[in-house]
Amino acid sequence: MSFKITDSVTWVGKVDWELRKFHGEEYSTHKGSTYNSYLVRDQKNVLIDTVWIPFAGQFVEKLKNEIPLEDIDFIIINHAEIDHSGSLPELMKHIPNTPIYCTANAVKSLKGHYHQAWDFRVVKTGEKLSIGSKEFVFVEAPMLHWPDTMMCYLTEDNILFSTDAFGQHYASEYMYNDLVDQSELYHECIKYYANILTPFSRMVDRKIKEVVGFNLPVNIICPSHGVLWRNDPLQIVKKYAEWAGDYQENQITILYDTMWDGTRRMAEAIAEGIKSADVTVNVKLFNTARRDKNDIITEVFKSKAILLGSPTVNKGILSSVAGIMEEIKGLAFKNKKAAAFGTYGWSGESVAILSELLKESGFAVINDGIKELWNPDEKAIAECIEFGKDFVLEITK
């Protein structure tokens, strides 16, 4: 499949309906994804990015149907990660002398991935590449989300090729934002930001201000994954600016794992207490062993506070809780409060361990947590309800 975006720009990427995990096994893609590649025709013809390695042969064959490969004058690689550059080795077998425009860091990455000395042309922010009646303007965007990343802007068509920024892992034959289910699109966008771009929010904020400061008209934003933004394209830029500002909603998320349901019952009682103290707050509970970790992280991103629960096991905590906290720690969430809870039988270390993990992950831990012995009885459940009420009062101070 290929389709025209404008008279001079054609999408030549790949829709991957079957993809369910990305970055190895790290990111869930319930809705599949796309690998967006773009062919720009003018006096000079330019290919922007390629597709992931498993589809390299298919990509090159379909590209031949669009244009004789020898007619491609330049290649732009906005990002060297192999879901963007993976078809380069196959393509360059046919056109080995075609110049590749990218950042200095991308040269290092591409050589590291493919061990080839292609004709790399290093570009920096503000530099331009004329292709006839139009030109590309390059904008370096380091750590959105790799050091090598850049964007490029096509004049006359007023298209921003934004790389990973403003994208989503979302497969659709309706490749424009105004044609797809809006709730699905929003969920995949915020999930993408929460799980991939959160650690770089300060850089996102600075880069958005820089790009907006160029005062360039933007008719379409073409990311590297998911649908293209043609209807009010700057709406996603505004969302990124919002998400980059230590984002939170009126939500409290409770994460827990449980062995014999005691910690689950504590979680539900704490949630009951929260709701009785504040009917406006959105409370969500997730068993970390049974729910998708990236969906959970998205909810943590949206939350103003979280509660974290585990029983004590071998003087430690359950593995699913430890695992998701390792992920959360790396994402470096800001401006969120937290507390811990859990059951125990004899030693009871879990709550202290959880509290320390929360502190190490950047959360403001507001109390010492609560632990209950064995399977909580009525008195213990009542204590958990009160703990939930007190938690709401503490985080609103």
Image: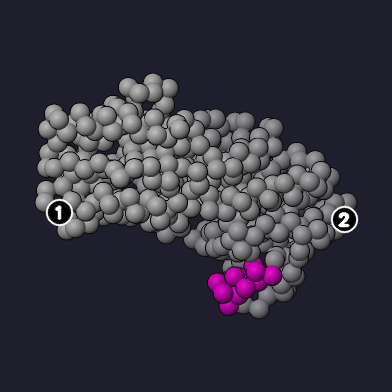
Label for residue 12? none
Which quadrant holds residue 150?
A: bottom right
The kind of residue tagged 1 is Ser
Observer able to see residue 96: no
In the rendering, at what x and y percent does residue 187 appear? Answer: 49, 36
Residue 172, x across and y down, in percent: 53, 39
At horizontal 45% and vertical 32% (from top left) the residue drawn is 397
* Magenta stretch: includes residue 105: yes
Query: Would you call the spot at circle 1 few (<14 residues within 10 Å), some (14-19), or many (20 or more)?
Result: few
- Residue 132: mark: 2
- The residue sitting at 71% across, 59% down in the picture is 140
Q: Is residue 38 above or below residue 273?
A: below
Q: Position of residue 92 (x, y in %)?
A: 65, 70
Q: Which residue is mark 1?
A: 347
Choose between 138 and 197: the one closer to the eye: 197
Residue 335 image offset from top left, x and y in percent: 50, 43
Provide the residue span drawn in magenta.
104-115
Three-letter amino acid code at disc 2? Gly
Give the mark nearest the N terminus, 1 or 2.
2
**SS class, disc 1:** loop
Q: What is the chief secondary structure element of the magenta stretch?
A: helix
Snapshot quadrant of residue 360: bottom left
Please identify the quarter of the rendering in which residue 395 is found.
Answer: top left
Q: How is the image coloured?
A: one colour
Query: What is the distance, in whole Å, between disc 1 and disc 2 at their CAs?
Result: 74 Å
